[in-house]
Amino acid sequence: MNGLAMKIVAPVCSVADAESVITAGADELYVGAMFDEWTCTFGDSDLLTRRQGRSAHIRTSRELASVVNIASQAGRPIALAINARYDAVQIRAVLDLVTLWEETGGAAVIVADIGLLLALAQRNSHMNRHLSLLAGAFNSLSVTFFAELGVSRVILPRDLTLGEVADLTAGSGNMEFEMVAMYQKCHFIDGMCGFHHATRLPSGVSAEFDYVAGPGTALPVVWAQDPEYEGHGCELPWRSLAGPVRWPRRDDLSSPNCAACQLPAMARSGIRYVKLAGRAYSSDMIVRAIRFLRSAMEAWQTGDDSSAQEDVRRLYSSTFGSACSCRDCYYNQ
Amino acid sequence: MEIAHWYDWRSPTGSDTSGQRVYFGHETCQQLLPTPGAARELARRLRDSGKSVTLVVPYLTEAGLRDSVRLIEGLLTQDASLEVVSSDWGLLHEIGRRGLGSPVVGRLLSGQLTDPRLARIMDVNRRRQPRPVRHLDGTVCQLQYIPPSLAMANRIRSCGLDRPEIIGFLKALGIRRCELSNISQGMELASIPGWSYSLHIPDVLITVMRRCPGSGEDFASAEHRCTDKVTPSCHGEPRAWEMPGINATVFRRDNALYYRQPNLPTNLQQLPIDRLVHRIGRQRDHDSINR
């Protein structure tokens, strides 16, 4: 297999993340930014980007500038995720953030809101517009629609099969395409999901919250809009017809969702960018995934198809500690 | 207020309805759209009984797009006033560009937040005990309720299209209506001339599954992909799901999850809603959700 010219797009949530993912071999970066001004009004749920929680975001403009600077010096384009849908009040704050991002030197934005695309066109922004998978471009006519709104890259919904992807890209001209290749294969369709994503509890990251001394309690208090929140809709167990309680499959370090075996088919369909989902995942998880995908690309480039497949599976097992299974397969047909 | 009825075309119970308009098609799965022949026959019957017709189409793959355009073109041969509700931007754009009927933004593109738990965020009178939480690193804290800001509350009650610049853009494409769910947290929408909303009663569409769950409701352990055929689980009857922490009866119908909110918004008269869409067609829908 030759010609597997794909770039790896990795998430960063801090200066340290930016340095480590660049060292690990990421070609492009993406980031979220959620400042105090936003959280004071709108909380830290998924109203700004689909990813909830402050640990998934850069928290100050100063750190945001540092991350952009690190990326620029390393020659890595970096995109800002602002991929929720906004109302008339929110869009003003979002446009302020976009202005800051552009002045800081950010190369691109990841967008799902039509009004935001219209605003970027109106202000003649030079930033590249990447269409978030939350916008749900499932076919070539949708790609054309968003191309006319200034989108230069489409991140495809992770619900398409590879055959459907090939059909779509064949009819989509010069558009750049990106697909998710590791982590977070939700059971629900991202762009078609109305579940609220608040900060998960209990959290592995206590620094997720702002603590204050509480009235009448020795415990530090956290103010939350929904203290009863038990988790995202896709993470809750469910039970039907007096059947057993069922648990959704979790995405963890020992058996992450993965598309490494499908990289050649993705490349044949014109996919030039593969994305690691998982903002706020540990730096170790992201770095391992970058190295794994890079090694998998090399295996596909240097070996014949059957030996490369075996090599990739061995790589998965040695990287993540367990053998892969069909359930882990991102675009299982 | 126009009264419309959503009719499940798979139902054997007929399409008799007292509404002025009938919706049919499928909102969440392209495999569950009627054939062009079945759609034409149903539309002819409806039109003969004086009803206006709305075809509902979900998000579409390339193959689904081709089929849907054929379906729409077939219906237009007998009804030039056909309305098409679509949750696919590409199809909406194409309908507007080619004049294939009247395009309407479907519920899945409305940008509404439809989690039933959002109602309790808005409920300042709800009795809550402070909740102790132990984080995975051993830190313990206590969660206490803080009401959402007015701005946050407005966003939770609004939808993602409710801005003049977006609606102006959509109107230029020939789109003048959007479908909404009757969300339990209440609704706030701006009135913009030439733009209106339909409100669906009582089923609130929460989310769509990437794969069909199969008859065992187990969409996590197996990947049921129905690219070629309809599975036995696609019968259109609601199946209740118990989900801890969700303060509503969630149910699955085909490949989507819903909850019920039968009470109309108290501020309905102030909202730019001029059509109510009631679901009919399956007796179980009216009686109870199948447990």
Image: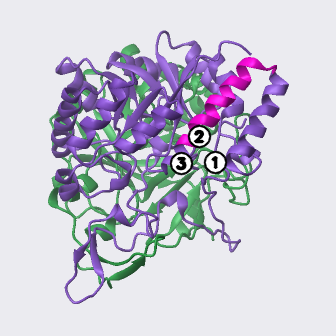
User: Is the residue marked by circle 2 packed among few (<14), some (14-19), or many (20+) residues within 10 Å?
Assistant: many
Query: Tag 1, which secondary structure?
Result: loop
Instruction: Give the chain letter at badge 3.
Output: A
Residue A297 inside the magenta-drawn segment? yes
The residue labelled by disc 2 is A289
Magenta region, mostly helix, strand or loop?
helix
Residue B49 horizontal/vertical position (percent) = 47, 39
Span shown in magenta: A287-304
The residue labelled by disc 1 is A256
Q: Nearer the viewer, mark 3 or mark 2?
A: 3
Residue A213 horizontal/vertical position (percent) = 21, 79
Residue A5 horizontal/vertical position (percent) = 59, 16
Q: Are marks 3 and 1 in contact (CB under 8 Å)?
A: no
Q: Nearer the viewer, mark 2 or mark 1?
A: 2
Judge whether B260 appears above or below B36 on screen.
below
Judge whether A211 appears above or below B202 on screen.
below
The residue labelled by disc 3 is A284
Q: Amino acid at mark 3?
A: Asp
Q: Colour of chain B?
A: green
Query: Tag 2, which secondary structure?
Result: helix
Between marks 2 and 1, how big is the CA–CA gap? 9 Å
Instruction: Give the chain letter at badge 1.
Output: A
User: Does the image show residue B30?
Assistant: no
Q: Amino acid at mark 1?
A: Pro
Query: Tag 3, which secondary structure?
Result: helix
Q: Colour of chain A?
A: purple
As rendered, which of A194 and B272 lies closer to the eye? A194
